[in-house]
Image (cartoon, helix red, strand yellow):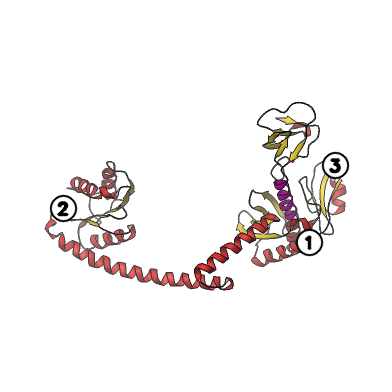
């Protein structure tokens, strides 16, 4: 740990992360407040006593300044337009958020606050620091009242906002570049996610790349992407409905074939239940479940089904039996590298090695009879 008589490194405080950089040739990995108004610099090794030259990671600092100044502007816009106060702020590594105390936040609120914020950014107004007691700052019209004693620091954005704050900020609003609202979530209040400056540029570039790629996949222009996506979703929904109907018909047909092929097993169990054991070359877990349901609905049946392609397994039985398919499956799986489970009448699992399917079914059958 290193303390200095004065420092330009900002410690973690007020929702803003600490600076990074170097003291001499030693990297600064964390900066924090300590007792007696000291700032502690955490270093991986010692720094000799005496004068030292500090160098801040400027890319990180300017990013934090853009986000923090943008937050002041956005919070002031929500107050000016809708009287929605900000109750908390977090500056994250990729996005920043403010939490609003509001009865509801609608898309139009976001759009209007975003536009008002960018108007102030484009005006390139002066951002200045002023000091005073809480009474003096209150008289000057600060946005947030504070009760701390002594001299306080406030950030003033020319003709728009005054807010007590100890964080780092830009000299002019134009340096923020642009603010984009990205997301709205309902928490205890309303959380608004935003990016500013270089982050906004990166987000806009990323959105454009995603949209361009989507348009290429859909063979349409950028403005037509929403319509093309909606059409694709509807076509998929129609295809899925048709596929489900066809699978139901196939399962009905296959269940009859399996019941006929296993007629010789009639009475194999003491209860007289038929045992249907089948390994399908290709079947999804959902189709196995559907087929099992068809089989056990046909009478007193125990179905032990598996898919060779996926390694999926389904054990099922007609309701009312004293047997336990879930217990049978769990006991059988102990000898195999499989995962699964289930209830008394229906259980399912999957094997890491589908080649062992036949051995598993044979083991289950021996336990069953």
Q: Is residue 112 left or right of residue 184?
A: right
Q: Give the residue pinned by disc 3.
A: 151
The stretch of residues the image draws in magenta is 56-72
Identity of the residue drawn at 25% across and 50% down = 357
The image quarter in which residue 243 lies: bottom left
Question: How many residues crowd around disc 2 within 10 Å: few (fewer than 14), some, or many (20 or more)?
Answer: few
From this viewpoint, which residue is outermost toward the top? 49
Give whichever of 88, 9 is nearer the camera: 9
* Earlier sequence position, callout 3 versus callout 2: 3
* Earlier sequence position, callout 2 versus callout 1: 1
Spatial CA span between label 3 and label 2: 88 Å
Identity of the residue drawn at 60% across and 57% down = 186
Disc sitting over residue 271 in the figure: 2
Horizontal and vertical percent for residue 228? 51, 72
From this viewpoint, which residue is outermost toward the front? 25
Give whichever of 209, 129 is nearer the camera: 209
Identity of the residue drawn at 26% across and 63% down = 294
Disc sitting over residue 120 in the figure: 1
Give whichever of 194, 208 is nearer the camera: 208
Labels 3 & 1 near each other (Cβ < 8 A): no
Labels 2 & 1 near each other (Cβ < 8 A): no
Q: Is residue 30 above or below residue 156?
A: above
Mark 1 element type: helix
State whether residue 100 appears in this view: no
Horizontal and vertical percent for residue 266? 13, 57
Question: How many residues crowd around disc 3 within 10 Å: few (fewer than 14), some, or many (20 or more)?
Answer: few
Disc 3 vs disc 1: which is toward the camera? 1
Question: How many residues crowd around disc 1 within 10 Å: few (fewer than 14), some, or many (20 or more)?
Answer: many
The image quarter in which residue 308 lies: bottom left
């Amino acid at each position: 740990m290193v303390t200095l008589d004065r420092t330009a490194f900002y410690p973690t405080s007020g929702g803003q992360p600490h600076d990074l950089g170097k003291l001499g040739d030693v990297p600064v990995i964390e900066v924090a407040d300590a007792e007696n108004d000291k700032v502690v610099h955490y270093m991986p090794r010692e720094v000799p006593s005496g004068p030292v030259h500090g160098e801040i990671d400027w890319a990180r600092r300017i990013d934090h300044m853009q986000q923090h100044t943008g937050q002041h502007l956005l919070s002031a816009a929500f107050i000016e337009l809708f009287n929605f106060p900000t109750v908390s702020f977090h500056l994250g590594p990729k996005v920043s958020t403010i939490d609003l105390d509001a009865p509801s936040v609608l898309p139009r609120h976001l759009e209007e606050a975003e536009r008002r914020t960018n108007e102030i950014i484009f005006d390139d107004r002066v951002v200045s620091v002023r000091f005073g007691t809480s009474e003096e700052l209150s008289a000057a019209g600060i946005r947030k009242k504070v009760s701390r004693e002594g001299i306080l620091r406030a950030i003033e954005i020319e003709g728009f906002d005054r807010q007590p704050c100890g964080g780092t900020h830009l000299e002019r609003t134009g340096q923020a570049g642009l603010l984009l609202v990205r997301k709205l979530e309902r928490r205890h209040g309303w959380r608004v996610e935003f990016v500013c400056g270089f982050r906004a540029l990166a987000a806009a570039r990323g959105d454009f790349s995603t949209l361009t790629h989507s348009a290429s996949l859909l063979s349409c222009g950028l403005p037509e992407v929403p319509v093309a996506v909606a059409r694709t979703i509807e076509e998929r929904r129609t295809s899925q409905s048709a596929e489900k109907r066809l699978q139901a018909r196939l399962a009905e047909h296959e269940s009859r074939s399996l019941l006929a092929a296993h007629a010789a097993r009639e009475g194999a169990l003491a209860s007289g239940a038929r045992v249907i054991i089948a390994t399908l070359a290709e079947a999804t877990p959902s189709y196995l479940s559907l087929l099992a349901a068809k089989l056990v609905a046909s009478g007193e049946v125990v179905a032990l089904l598996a898919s060779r392609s996926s390694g999926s397994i389904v054990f099922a039985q007609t309701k009312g039996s004293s047997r336990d398919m879930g217990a049978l499956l769990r006991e059988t799986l102990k000898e195999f590298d499989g995962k699964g489970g289930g209830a008394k009448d229906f259980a399912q699992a999957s094997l890491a090695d589908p080649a062992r399917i036949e051995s598993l079914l044979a083991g289950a059958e021996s336990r069953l009879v």
